[in-house]
Amino acid sequence: MTAVLTPPVPSPAAEPRAAARSPWAAWAAWAAWRSRWPLLPLVATVLLPALPYGTSGGGGPADVASGIAVLVCVGRLLYLRQRPLSATAALVLGLPAVGFAVATVTAADPAAALPGLVRYLQVFVLVPAAVFLLLRDAYGFRIVAGSLVLLAVVQGVTGVHQYVTGTGASYMGEDVRAVGTFGPSDVMGMATVVAYGLLAAAACALRTPRSAPAWLRPCAAVLAVVLIVPLTLSFSRGVWIATAAAVLVSLALSGRRQAVTSLAVLGAAGVVLVGGFGIGSEMVADRAASVTRVTSTPDRSVSDRYAMWSAAGAMWREQPAAGVGLKGFPDHRDGHASIGLSSGSDTAGAGQEFRRQALLSPHNMYLLVLGEQGLIGLTTLVGSWAAILVGAIRRLWLARSRANAALDCGLVAVALMTWQSVNFLYADIGGPTTVLGGVVLGLAAWWALAEPNRVSAA
């Protein structure tokens, strides 16, 4: 009898692998990536703030990348001849420009206010609009959010190394403050990008995309917990408060059972990292307590901040409608601040010699806008942010019952927007990470205002 050899029947699991190796599948994958090249300037905008550059003047690499992103967006709109924004999105994203223009034309020296106008338009209008328009779907959103996580990991590892080796910025007489590649002149830089990455990773762990591989959720959860270490070692009080608020909002929107489990994990991680290993426990406790220590043995940075807040309020009372003009705070500071305000803050460490850094802003975005742009500027800017935040929360709440909703994107958008809103109580714009604020606003606006078919799961 002659044996008849028949080829084995391919298993169902082998068919996708064979299809993936076919030339047509490779071409389809390449075509998909080629269609997403407009995201490259956005990814560069996210990653380039990590490059150290001189802060004496001019924009940094990330600002250049954001300008390229805006130009790419304009070019695509002209080429495709599409309506750029819906009426609602145009109103929300363009409203702050009204306040900026009024504060510029009413300033005592409009020419001196023009650089401020350009900067504010870049961060709060042009970059968010470019992000909104260049993101086609949830997959593009995840690419930009993943870039935030990558930047956070790189800066977090650098910051922890600085603390362990004593090569960080000077803090309480020791060079232990984790500042990453941003240096002691921008101590908030590393803390900001680490917080962004932590929130993006936490959102991915809480609401992992259904199409994601099985390893993504545990990796995202581990990253979110590990990033607590460099965030703690940054000794940035405002960032701690903003991150805690954003995490709580994310947990509240993710469901009661998941919130309880996540809080237990975070509590255990905090006990192990700070209590068990003693990572900066004494310094962290002292730093946290200094927030309310104003009258008895106050922290100099706290008393200076409150003095500048008072100065910004005095400027607003003097010019309540339109403020003293963009970039006007430094010129009007001494005429409105108390005599207790010091001339500057001391910075050193992380490869930099001792330097006296002038206090040129109140470290409160809302009071800075109120003092420089008055009620008109504050109403238009905060009104835009409030519309984005409320819209993002509303869409996320409604999307929880839909099977095809990209809930991870919604959770990232809400967490980042919450963080930005709270952090602006203790910080304002300035430094290489400023442009990242525009990216965050764009991500939140995309989730809150984009057409429903664009925010469905990819």
Image (cartoon, helix red, strand yellow):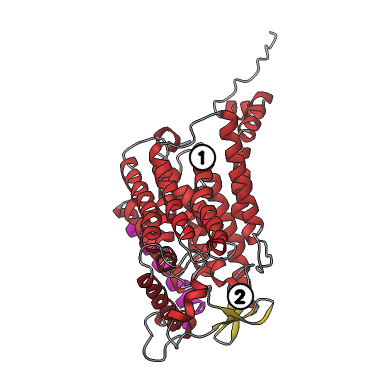
Mark 2 belongs to which amino acid?
Pro
| Quadrant of residue 243 within the rendered picture | bottom left
- Residue 151 place in picture, x, y as percent: 59, 57
- Residue 19 place in picture, x, y as percent: 62, 26
Look at 49% across and 37% down and name the residue there. Answer: 137
- Residue 88 place in picture, x, y as percent: 38, 40
Q: Nearer the viewer, residue 145 or 129?
A: 129
- Examine the rendered structure and indicate whether residue 383 appears above or below residue 109: above
Q: Which residue is mark 2?
A: 184
Pointer 2 local density, CA inside 10 Å: few below 14, some 14–19, many at least 20: many
Look at 56% across and 45% down and name the residue there. Answer: 143
Of pointers 2 and 1, the one earlier in the residue sequence: 1
In the image, taking residue 432 as reference, residue 410 lies left or right, namely left
Q: Name the chief secondary structure element in magenta.
A: helix
Q: Nearer the viewer, residue 256 or 191?
A: 191
In the image, taking residue 85 as reference, residue 391 lies left or right, namely left
Q: Mark 2: which secondary structure?
A: helix
Look at 41% across and 75% down and name the residue there. Answer: 309
Q: Quick check: can you spot residue 219?
A: no
Magenta residues (range): 259-282
| Quadrant of residue 434 within the rendered picture | bottom right
Look at 57% across and 61% down and name the residue there. Answer: 111
Q: Residue furthest left?
A: 256
In the image, taking residue 354 as reference, residue 412 lies left or right, namely left
Q: Which residue is mark 1?
A: 133
